[in-house]
Amino acid sequence: MLCLRLAAALGCALLGAATAAAQDRQIRVDVTVAATPAQVWPLWTTNEGVRSFFAPGSNIELKVDGLYEIFFAPAAPAGQRGADGMRLLVVESNRRLVFTWNAPTALPYVRGQRTVVSVDFTPVGADSTRVTLRHTGWGSGPEWDEAIAYFEPAWNGFVMASFKRRMEHGPIDWKALPTLQPVRRNAIERLVAAP
């Protein structure tokens, strides 16, 4: 049910994706929250924390090359639950988390590849943290364009918006999803100037 609601909400973003060359774009979303990095870190690095805003299911092994599986449909068969089989690449406590990511099953070529998501935790004053999510590693071609267009509202309008709401109002109720507003107008950034 959650997957269907997310797919319906995100499907319209597939329209109008501009063709781009590999590695010349990223998705970037920043959220500043009233908590220290040590308070925010467990929300991204524990099953309990992830399930409070990211997805209703997960399997996290907090170590380099440990699993970082995020299940949007935990009851679905293995391989169809969401980010099955994803791995942690960098674990710098209270500073940085980097993990692999895959695409939806509707984009089989891109799903067979891996992109990279980094989450940086930067102190802002004594009691706030800027959390910056970057999704990189995009390839070239129409299916890659569909993938980045799919993930822009997924990260910007759902995950980071949900994280912000979680920090302000408490854990998400997965049976009654709140209405969320995107953090940014558009979170896709070009990394090189267009020719």
Image: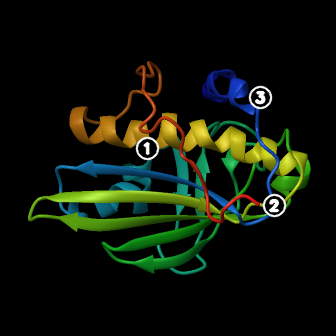
Which labelled disc corresponds to residue 103? none
The Cα–Cα distance between marks 1 and 2, rounded to whole angstroms, is 26 Å
Residue 28 pos. (x, y %): 51, 54
> Residue sitting at 43 percent across and 43 percent down?
160
Is residue 172 depicted above or below 193 in this figure? above
Residue at the spot x=27%, y=51% of the render?
32
What is the x, y in percent for residue 57? 54, 44
Distance from Cα at disc 3 to Cα at disc 2 = 18 Å
Q: Which residue is mark 1?
A: 160
Judged by depth in the image, the label closer to the viewer, 1 or 3, is 3
Q: How many marks?
A: 3
SS of the residue under disc 2: loop
Indicate the amino acid at tag 1.
Met
Q: Is residue 123 left or right of residue 110?
A: left
Q: Earlier in the sequence, mark 1 or mark 2?
A: 2
Q: Quadrant of the N terminus?
A: top right
Left or right side of 143 for 32: left
Residue at 78% over, 50% down: 79
- The residue at which mark 3 appears reads as 15
* Horizontal side of residue 36 vs 67, given as left or right: left
> What residue is disc 2 on?
21
Give how far apart the Cα atoms at labels 1 and 3 are. 22 Å
